[in-house]
Amino acid sequence: MGRVLRVSDPRIDALRLRFDELRPALEIHVALMIADLAGPRPTPVELLETTWQAVRHRSSTALTYAAAVRELDGALHNWTLRRHIATGGLDHAFAYLLPHLRKWAGQLSQGLPAPRPDPDDFVHDAFLKLRAAPGFWTADNPIGYAFRVVKNLIVDHARRESRASEIAAQQSPAIGVELEASSQRLHAIVRRAQLSAKERCMVFRKVFEGMSVTAAQKACGGPPGAPYYVLEKIYDKLAAAFGVERNRP
């Protein structure tokens, strides 16, 4: 039988040449990365080969040292994550992933309009999704898999918020009329109860702007005291102004 001729890919050949130019510096970086690792360690050859495969599939011929180092760091994270999954299951893997998830959630959620959800909410949802995803256990790139889960959660949230804003905009004339009437009624109630300026501020921030009790108290500069206790006292004043006895749980 004749020999099988392999067709060379100029892009891959140029990329390999560039990777080999960077290899001595990458070998130094690998040695520093694994020097302080406890327990089993990946070999430098193993990490560099994994890095090359990642570069081969994702990079252009304009490969920089910084881009190669990012792929190399990812290769070590994936090796460590797979070891945690193999030896300790998902609980160990999640403990290792937690700081990464928090960093990604914090960075990606910065692009969301205010008021932004707490990034830890996305971290919690990501844990639930990863726990229920069989593909995470066997993924070649589990760190990338986890990143995509966080990213998709934030993208989905942004889409839902955008859709809700569109619906609100369509209904805004009717909502505006109702809010104006409600605002007038609330102003009359507040005047009758003789609330202080800070107490009035706190009521309006809580009722009409939807702030949390703690955020409303902070935004209004007081009144001093535990926020829920303060709000209860304000409601007591409002009820007393109308001779209404409040029913508390």
Image: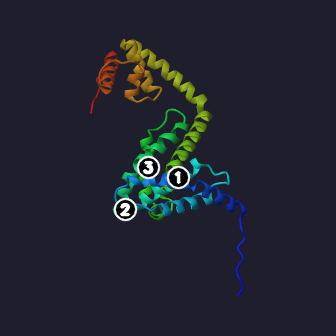
How many numbered marks appear? 3
| Residue indicated by mark 3 | 125
| Residue indicated by mark 2 | 40
Q: CA distance from mark 2 to mark 3?
A: 31 Å
Residue 64 in the image: state x and y as whole percent.
61, 49
Residue 5: mark: none
Front position among marks 2 and 3: 2
The image quadrant that residue 194 belongs to is top left
Viewer-side residue, 188 vs 160: 160
Amino acid type indicated by mark 1: Arg
Element type at marker 1?
A: helix
Amino acid type indicated by mark 3: Asp
Residue 19 in the image: state x and y as whole percent.
61, 57
Please tell me which residue is depicted at 45% across the width and 64% down the height of the picture: 134
| Residue indicated by mark 1 | 148
Front position among marks 1 and 2: 2
Viewer-side residue, 215 vs 189: 215
Tell me if 118 is positioned left or right of 48 in this view.
left
Badge 3, how many Cα within 10 Å: few under 14, some, many 20+?
A: some
Among the two numbered marks 1 and 2 on one chain, the one whose residue lies closer to the N terminus: 2
Among the two numbered marks 2 and 3 on one chain, the one whose residue lies closer to the N terminus: 2
Tell me if 75 is positioned left or right of 240 in this view.
right
Badge 2, how many Cα within 10 Å: few under 14, some, many 20+?
A: few
Element type at marker 3?
A: helix
The quarter of the picture where the N terminus appears is bottom right
Residue 132, can we see it? no
Q: CA distance from mark 3 to mark 1?
A: 13 Å
Element type at marker 2?
A: loop
The quarter of the picture where the C terminus appears is top left
Residue 159, can we see it? yes
Mark 2 vs 3: CB contact within 8 A = no
Please tell me which residue is depicted at 62% across the width and 60% down the height of the picture: 56
